Image (tube, rainbow, N blue to C red):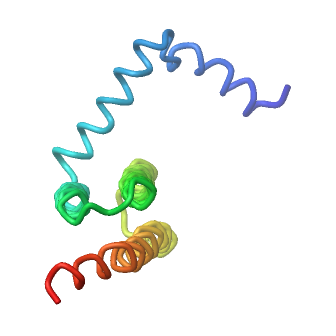
Amino acid sequence: MNDIEKLVKKNTSKHKNGSFKKALRNAINGCLYAFFSQKNFIIHFIVSVVVLLLALWLKVSFERFLFLLLVILFCLTIEIANTVFEKTVDLITDEWNPKAKLAKDLAAGMMLMASIGSLIIGFLILLPPLLAKFL
């Protein structure tokens, strides 16, 4: 066992959740942190609720609604992952560093790509019934 494996093994026991209940509580705390402290997560969440309400009002098919829900959950998950990357970089260095900036930019780019994809999918699903409703 090398030094890194020893260090991981040594520190794992005090960082383990210990039980499913504690792991679930920690996961919920992470989601609440994202919801109450991350402006972009809040914006994505509010837009997501509006999109789902619009889908219900337009009476999109069950399958299309599930697909919208899946895309929304994917984007919210990516937003949390983006926050994880940013917090991890902040934990590693307080000073400006071009590599730290690149890591944060890449994480933000990941969220941008997911947002663009979800926007396209949302339009493809919602635009036809929306046009049919008003035309």
Compared across the picture, whether 47 is left or right of 83 comes to left
Q: Residue at x 58, y 21 (%)?
A: 11
Q: Is residue 24 visible?
A: yes
* Relative height, residue 3 to residue 133 (above, below): above
* Relative height, residue 2 to residue 75 (above, below): above
Q: Quadrant of the C terminus?
A: bottom left
Q: Residue 27 is drawn in which quadrant?
A: top left
Q: Residue at x 32, y 63 (%)?
A: 60
The number of numbered discs placed on residues in the rendered structure image is 0
* Relative height, residue 38 to residue 20 (above, below): below
Depth order, front residue of 106/9: 106
Q: Residue at x 49, y 72 (%)?
A: 106
Q: Residue at x 17, y 57 (%)?
A: 46
Q: Is residue 83 visible?
A: no
Compared across the picture, whether 94 is left or right of 57 comes to right
* Image location of residue 1, percent across then percent down: 85, 25
